[in-house]
């Protein structure tokens, strides 16, 4: 299978489609669980398959440092290494390098940085970022971009936009010359696909310009990057809403690193096809669980005696078997199983949310609205 995107249904701005990759078909809009180090923390791959996950996100920066790209390549690529037969997307490492702040130095050539693990020196250029992702063997790879900090002046956002575009051209040239070198080339039909990334800070006109100029480079898909860096969520929505009209209507649109269940439902209805976020897994490890009745902080003592399921409207294996009291006990006892069960439920909730959006678009119905309430005291 090669790379292909087909839109099957539309409802207002929302689209339901099928993204065909060398490792399987992904139904969109889709939520991609984050498997930073070739693992979604606490959840084995067979359970991810059972939950219906069709595509995972891997992190190039972290895998580049440990176990190393060449190690993964020698072991057959990321799919074989982590025993995951379905699709994988890798980010370029740009956001992680951006988050290092004092440990990095940006130049036209690329980014020099020191590892957060051992302080060793490294360098990532647009070409090296693509080389690493080709070596990892993801189905979808991302351009190396400069993620603009927040707040950023208009001049700073402009500089970052221009740098990202120059890096995108360089990365695309390298990719076009080496895209046949994925570890699974020859074993699986098709080749990797490279997505471009739109930047421009919190300035809608710069976002429009970045989108238009990135589209001119003719990528098979486009991402909106540089959000969830500290801005107000209303600003995030404004930027997404202002950018989407300038991305091709026949190619996948990926919103990077966003959001809550309410947000992914909203963005799916707005025409975003792909989303990822660490929130469901990170929140689970801290005892924050998403339910149809609002968010629950399972660490609170009030749940110690509650015999009912975490979410009476959820059919996941956690809610169908375990009580709130037991989940609270596991968390209070610092049991590893608490992380496993909490993460399983949160991922199930997110996946069910995006499925309901997809289903509503296909039926031509209004996208369901989720009602979130603050964590219970």
Image (spheres, grey):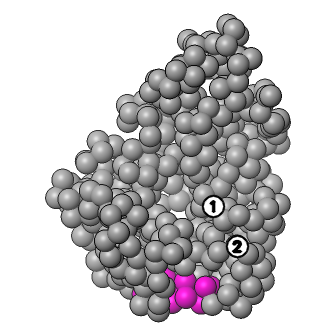
Residue appearing at x 44%, y 69% in the figure: 92
* Lateral position of residue 229 relative to residue 1, left or right: right
* Lateral position of residue 79 relative to residue 236, left or right: left
Q: Where is residue 21 in the image (x, y as percent from the top left)?
A: 41, 55
Residue appearing at x 50%, y 69% in the figure: 100
Q: In which quarter of the image is residue 306?
A: top right
Residue 97 showing in the rendered view? yes
| Distance from Cα at disc 1 to Cα at disc 2 | 18 Å
Q: Name the element at disc 1.
A: strand
On screen, residue 184 above or below 105: above
Q: Nearer the viewer, mark 1 or mark 2?
A: 2
Q: Quadrant of residue 131?
A: bottom left
On screen, residue 375 above or below 132: above
Q: Which quadrant is home to the C terminus?
A: top right
Residue 291 showing in the rendered view? no
The magenta stretch is 160-170
Q: Residue 150 has which mark? A: 2
Of residues 39 and 97, the one nearer the viewer is 97
Of residues 318 and 3, the one nearer the viewer is 318
Q: Does the magenta stretch include residue 346?
A: no
* Lateral position of residue 361 relative to residue 341, left or right: right
* Lateral position of residue 46 relative to residue 95, left or right: left
Q: Is residue 168 magenta?
A: yes
Label 1 or label 2, whichever comes before in sequence order: 2
Q: Residue 255 has which mark? A: 1
Residue appearing at x 26%, y 56% in the figure: 67
Q: Which quadrant is home to the N terminus?
A: bottom left
Q: Position of residue 349 (x, y in %)?
A: 63, 33
Q: Name the element at disc 2.
A: loop
Of residues 34 and 336, the one nearer the viewer is 336
Q: Position of residue 312 (x, y in %)?
A: 71, 16
Q: Position of residue 149 (x, y in %)?
A: 65, 74
């Amino acid at each position: 299978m090669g790379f292909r995107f087909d839109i099957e249904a539309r409802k207002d701005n929302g689209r339901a489609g099928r993204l065909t990759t060398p490792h399987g078909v992904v139904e969109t809009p889709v939520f991609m669980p984050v498997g930073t180090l070739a693992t979604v923390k606490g959840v084995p791959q067979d359970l991810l398959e059972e939950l219906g996950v069709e595509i995972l996100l891997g992190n190039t920066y972290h895998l580049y440092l440990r176990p190393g790209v060449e190690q993964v390549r020698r072991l057959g690529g990321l799919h074989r290494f982590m025993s995951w037969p379905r699709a994988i997307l890798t980010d370029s490492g740009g956001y992680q390098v951006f988050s290092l702040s004092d440990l990095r130095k940006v130049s036209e050539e690329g980014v020099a940085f020191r590892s957060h693990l051992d302080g060793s020196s490294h360098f990532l250029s647009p070409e090296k970022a693509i080389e690493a992702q080709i070596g990892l063997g993801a189905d979808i790879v991302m351009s190396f971009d400069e993620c603009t900090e927040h707040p950023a002046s208009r001049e700073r956002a402009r500089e970052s936009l221009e740098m990202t575009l120059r890096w995108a051209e360089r990365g695309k040239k390298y990719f076009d010359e080496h895209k046949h070198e994925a570890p699974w080339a020859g074993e699986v039909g098709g080749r990797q696909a490279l997505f471009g990334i739109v930047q421009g800070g919190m300035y809608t006109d710069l976002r429009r310009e970045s989108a238009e100029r990135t589209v001119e480079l003719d990528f098979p898909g486009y991402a909106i990057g540089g959000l969830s860096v500290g801005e107000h969520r209303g600003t995030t929505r404004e930027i997404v809403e202002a950018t989407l009209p300038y991305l091709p209507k026949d190619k996948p649109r990926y919103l990077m690193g966003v959001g809550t269940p309410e947000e992914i439902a909203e963005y799916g209805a707005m025409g975003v096809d792909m989303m990822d976020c660490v929130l469901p897994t990170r929140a689970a490890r801290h005892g924050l669980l998403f339910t149809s009745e609002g968010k629950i902080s399972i660490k609170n003592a009030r749940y110690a005696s509650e015999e009912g399921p975490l979410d009476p409207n959820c059919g996941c294996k956690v809610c169908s078997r375990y009580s709130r009291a037991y989940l609270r006990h596991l968390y209070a006892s610092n049991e590893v199983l608490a992380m496993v069960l909490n993460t399983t439920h949160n991922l199930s909730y997110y996946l069910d949310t995006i499925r309901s959006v997809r289903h509503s678009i296909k039926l031509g119905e209004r996208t369901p609205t989720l009602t979130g309430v603050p964590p219970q005291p």
